[in-house]
Amino acid sequence: MAPTDETAQVPQQASPLGTTPPQPPPSGDGAAPGARMPRWLPRAMVLALALIAVFQLGSWAFHQLIGLLINLLIAFFLALAIEPAVSWMAARDMRRGLATFLVFLGLAIAVAGFVTLLGSMLAGQIIKMVEGFPGYLDSVINWINTTFHTHLRRVDVQDSLVHSDWLRKYVQNSATGVLDVSAQVLGGLFQLLTIGLFSFYFAADGPRLRRALCSVLPPARQAEVLRAWEIAVDKTGGYLYSRGLMALISGIAHYVLLQALGIPYAPVLAVWVGLVSQFIPTIGTYLAGALPMLIAFTVDPWYALWVLIFVVVYQQFENYMLQPKLTARSVDIHPAVAFGSVIAGTALLGAVGALIAIPAVATLQAFLGAYVKRYDVTDDPRVHGHRTRGSGSLTARVRRLFER
């Protein structure tokens, strides 16, 4: 017999199904010979990294500029509010810049006069309270001694207050917080100046701004932008008109109360309550009612309680009776929509969102209403909340069920 060749290859057996059995992977790194990376994969990776970087940069820039954007939004709505007055003077051959300057000058004089009068009144009342503090303290000590049969003296109470730990800590905290308060005041003044400058530019250069915006749009889109701008001016003016009317009603109501109680500076306090409660959202009502209560307390502590009760009752009347009707007539927006828009605006932008939410939603509603197609509603009883005869009421169904 011939010797067997050990290097001879053994023939492969065919699989039962007649197909070639799977081959084992080639030795080495496991990659098929000649395999390459797709050409689009590096470009896709670079593009994805670039998009992520741009998104991160945009998010960082937005958070850094959000204060400026809010100031621009406030300035834009303020410019819309004074637009009718500026346009009225500009239509009578007055330069638009001069008309805007006169409007801002009138507003500045009114605000400065009111703040000066209010500050002098408040300073006088604080001095009066400080001078009368020993008398108030004596009356309180006498009441405590008479009621609880104690033997307190004003000298002992003053010594305990002066040498108390909480007073020392309060003075230290107040001293360290002076710089923070100063920085906040300077920041508020700078923010107010920024809003005033931008609103002046928006109002004075309104036609130029509209022309620049329309120059990049086709004629059909230009008409829509101008219509939206006109609607925004009307709705913002209507909103301010309604707030001013409610401020007038609130001021008159509180003036009658303060005058009846004999509270000093009743006209100034009434103007304070009307303006602050209507034009400072969220906390305006509490700020407006705190000052009259403080002044009333210097006259009689019971008068402060009466003022508090009147402020709470009038606030409920204004929220549920007065404000929905005036807002619906002047801004043409449903009270429920107005209430929801204020909540949404507060959640998004805080006090600023609460202030501009109603005119913004009213503008959007009026603009969309001009392009939404409406149809006549069929004369169906179910539209008015009446059920048809065949359906029957729930009571009749239950009665027929028991009769069976």
Image: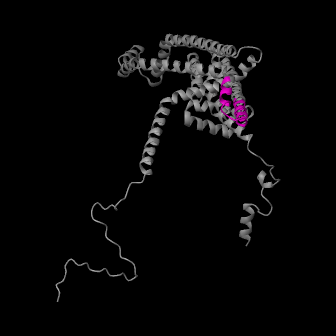
Q: Tell which residue pokes out farthest to the right in this image.
A: 379
Q: Quadrant of residue 371?
A: top right
Residue 217 screen position, x and y as percent: 67, 34
Residue 79 screen position, x and y as percent: 65, 23
User: Can residue 214 be found in the magenta stretch?
Assistant: yes
Q: Tell which residue pokes out farthest to the front in this image.
A: 2
User: What is the image's colouring?
Assistant: one colour
- For the point 59% across and 14% down, the residue is 115
Q: Nearer the viewer, residue 18 or 260?
A: 18
Main SS of the magenta part reads helix
Residue 107 screen position, x and y as percent: 65, 16
Instruction: Tell me if residue 280 can be seen.
Output: no
Instruction: Tell me if residue 281 can be seen.
Output: yes
Q: Quadrant of residue 326?
A: top right
Q: Vertical placement of 275 versus 224: above or below?
A: above
Residue 195 screen position, x and y as percent: 58, 22
User: Can residue 229 be found in the magenta stretch?
Assistant: yes
Q: Tell which residue pokes out farthest to the bottom in this image.
A: 1
Does residue 362 appear to the left or right of 126 in the view shown? Answer: right
Q: How many marks?
A: 0
Highlighted range, magenta:
208-232
Q: Quadrant of residue 349?
A: top right
- For the point 17% across and 89% down, the residue is 1
- For the point 44% across and 39% down, the residue is 53
Q: Vertical placement of 118 versus 37: above or below?
A: above
Quadrant of image for the C terminus: bottom right
Q: Nearer the viewer, residue 207 or 39?
A: 39
